Image: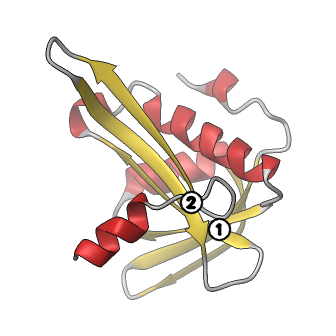
Amino acid sequence: RSEEAQAFARVDHRARMAIIAEVATEREAELIGGARYGPSDEAGIADIGLLVEDGWQGIGLGPILLDELLRAGEQRGIREFSADELTDNRRALHLLARYTSITQRTTSGGVTRLVFRHRADNSLLASVS
């Protein structure tokens, strides 16, 4: 478990990147979301992960984190990304369908794997509602 946490926290700002969102509280900063990419098993594709705390969902934070993460990857030469989502996680699948260009979708054993690119029109945030 500790090794997994260390691997997740380790970034090199090239093949592995992490972006966090936090809000200031009276005592300290509170982590409310994060996005991360890292190498996948497929050459040239980076796996992503995205998490927004329950109380902060539905206000546009997910699309902002996704956009920033994909832009950071593109700036470092990454053109394709992937995500494995539970097939019943409609919110995550909708987010990716709405704000990326999906090039491949496969479903097996209750998991949907998406391969996608950052939208070429760069209007991702203009459509956040």
Helix, strand or loop at mark 2: strand
Task: Tell me the residue at 75%/82% (across/down).
Answer: 43
In the rendering, which numbered label is found on residue 46? 1
Residue 81 occupies which quadrant of the picture?
A: bottom right
Q: Residue furthest left?
A: 27
Task: Tell me the residue at 30%/67% (across/down).
Answer: 5
In the rendering, which numbered label is found on residue 37? 2
Marked residue nearer the N-terminal end (1 or 2): 2
Who is closer to the viewer here, 41 or 11?
A: 11
Q: Position of residue 91 (x, y in %)?
A: 40, 49
Residue at mark 1 to residue at mark 2: CA–CA distance: 6 Å
Circles 1, 2 touching at the beta carbon (< 8 Å): yes
Location of residue 14 with respect to 26 vertically, above or below = below
Q: Position of residue 46 (x, y in %)?
A: 65, 68
Specify the color scheme.
secondary structure
Task: Tell me the residue at 80%/34% (across/down).
Answer: 122
- Which residue type does callout 1 highlight? Ala
- Which residue type does callout 2 highlight? Tyr
Q: Position of residue 29 (x, y in %)?
A: 26, 24
Location of residue 19 with respect to 103 vertically, above or below = above
- Is residue 72 left or right of 128 when viewed as pictured? right
Location of residue 36 with respect to 66 vertically, above or below = below
